[in-house]
Image: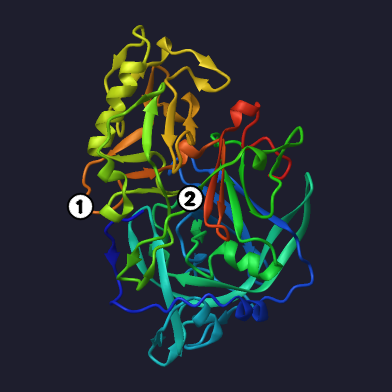
């Protein structure tokens, strides 16, 4: 999500060197799974989607927030980091080159080194907390990381990377991420040290992952990392339903001196109940400082003001006349009496929203389960928010509520994103699998 940030370090340059052979020398393993996975839980307070990895020696479980555009895994090393297998990456080392950084320095208190996250002759990359818009530097390091694998419809053996490259951060960077959350897991496609790229390099599978976020705070969703199929209970493979659209080349970030790791797609139109919503098409162009990105940092899709007003007006016009509008509930502006709206297997009975993609007649469908949100017993609201200030950045940022109980595949190798549409069409959901 392209927003303004609080910059805590001076301007510096990154050299983007995606060196797969270098990483292979760092992560030696004899077990080569084809697919790995993370269980993902929705935090009821922050609405962030949280996963857990095992890291360090001895292994420690860490709660980390999913950051789709993040360049790396970063964790709080300031409080309680203890590991016999921790190794700081030294300036100009292969780890630093893989992380595309030339920023080096010493971190000392008097003449005593602090330890993890603060070493002499260290190198640093950019880390980010997307919730509070903190962008700062993290010290690059290595340590053991483990992740569960998939064996057909069952959980497979645990996979281990002995020298996983990550970044250390100060405790303040974790603010607002959720209770006991110690950092983020980066899935960015422009970084050689993001989680899917490192795992693909270590285990020789496709640079690809698929996110399936649960709508429930009680039942887990899943992120598949590696090869399909993406199996749900009853043997349904969600990869068979995917419609693909290309990712757009990321814009250049002058601060990081590299391309942004956001995932951008072409949105050509928005229609509601088959009727096109009038939109200024200039706002849909990334080249003209608009465009569309996908974010796990936003709980609800954010629209530029003119698009938001056009969509809300069209949605209200397509609601049945007996559905009463009610006072808005923040952060929403378009709300309805919940007693006037029926339910089906696709969620609330609501006008169908179609997001037109790069080709004519190719669209991603949003049904009532993803377009309306229940805010209390009496009120449901249109689950989109208005971007009140848009000096620069995307006109449409797709948030996690619209992705819930849809499977969204990010195929980094083939530069495309696949949408399944709601799994409710298949009478299943993201929590309906045997892995999490």
Q: Can residue 329 be seen here?
A: no
Q: Residue furthest front?
A: 360
Of marks 2 and 1, the one in the foreground:
1
x, y percent for residue 312: 30, 27
Query: Could you say whether the residue bearing mark 1 is in a helix, strand or loop?
Result: loop
Residue at 35 percent of width and 34 percent of height: 384
x, y percent for residue 160: 71, 67
Q: Tell me if residue 266 comes above or below residue 181 in the rendering.
A: above
The residue beneath circle 2 is 179
Front in this rendered view, residue 117 or 422:
422
Position of 153 with respect to 95 (left or right) is right
Instruction: Name the quarter where the C terminus is drawn.
Output: top right
The residue beneath circle 1 is 391
Mark drawn on residue 28: none
Gap between marks 2 and 1 measured at Cα: 33 Å
Task: For label 2, count other residues whose C-alpha is less than 10 Å away and answer few (under 14), some (14-19) or many (20+).
Answer: few
Front in this rendered view, residue 282 or 339:
282
Q: Earlier in the sequence, mark 2 or mark 1?
A: 2
């Amino acid at each position: 999500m392209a927003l303004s940030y609080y910059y805590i370090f001076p301007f510096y340059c990154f050299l983007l060197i995606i060196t797969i052979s270098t990483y292979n020398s760092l992560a030696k393993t004899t077990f080569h799974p084809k697919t790995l996975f993370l269980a993902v839980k929705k935090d009821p307070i922050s609405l962030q989607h949280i996963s857990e990895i095992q890291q360090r020696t001895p292994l420690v479980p860490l709660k980390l927030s999913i950051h789709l555009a993040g360049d790396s895994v970063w964790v709080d090393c300031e409080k309680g980091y203890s590991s016999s297998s921790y190794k700081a990456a030294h300036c100009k080392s292969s780890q630093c080159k893989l992380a595309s950084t030339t920023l080096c320095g010493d971190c000392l208190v008097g003449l005593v080194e602090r330890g993890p996250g603060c070493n002499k002759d260290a190198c640093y990359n950019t880390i980010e907390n997307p919730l509070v818009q903190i962008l700062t530097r993290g010290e690059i390091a290595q340590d053991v990381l483990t992740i569960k694998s998939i064996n057909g419809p069952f959980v497979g053996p645990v996979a281990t990377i002995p020298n996983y490259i990550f970044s250390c951060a100060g405790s303040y960077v974790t603010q607002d991420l959720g209770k006991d959350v110690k950092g983020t897991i980066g899935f960015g496609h422009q970084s050689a040290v993001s989680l899917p790229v490192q795992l693909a390099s270590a285990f020789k599978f496709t640079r690809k992952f698929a996110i399936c976020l649960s709508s429930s705070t009680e039942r887990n969703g899943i992120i598949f990392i590696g090869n399909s199929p993406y199996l749900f209970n009853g043997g349904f493979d969600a990869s068979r339903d995917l419609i693909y659209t290309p990712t757009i080349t990321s814009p250049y970030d002058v601060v990081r001196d590299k391309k942004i790791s956001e995932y951008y797609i072409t949105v050509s139109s928005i229609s509601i109940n088959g009727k096109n919503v009038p939109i200024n098409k200039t706002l849909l162009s990334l080249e003209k400082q608009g465009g569309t990105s996908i974010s796990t940092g936003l709980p609800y899709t954010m629209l530029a003001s003119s698009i938001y007003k056009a969509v809300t007006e069209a949605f209200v016009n397509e609601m049945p006349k007996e559905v009463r509008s009610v006072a808005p509930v923040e952060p929403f502006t378009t709300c309805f009496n919940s007693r006037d709206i029926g339910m089906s297997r696709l969620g609330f009975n609501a006008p169908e929203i179609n997001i037109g993609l790069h080709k004519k007649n190719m669209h991603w469908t949003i049904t009532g389960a993803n377009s309306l949100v229940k805010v209390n017993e009496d009120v449901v609201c249109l689950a989109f928010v208005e971007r009140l200030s848009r000096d620069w950045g995307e006109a449409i940022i797709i948030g996690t509520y619209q992705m819930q109980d849809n499977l969204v595949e990010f195929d980094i190798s083939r530069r495309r994103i696949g949408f399944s549409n709601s799994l409710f069409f298949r009478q299943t959901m993201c929590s309906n699998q045997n892995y999490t």
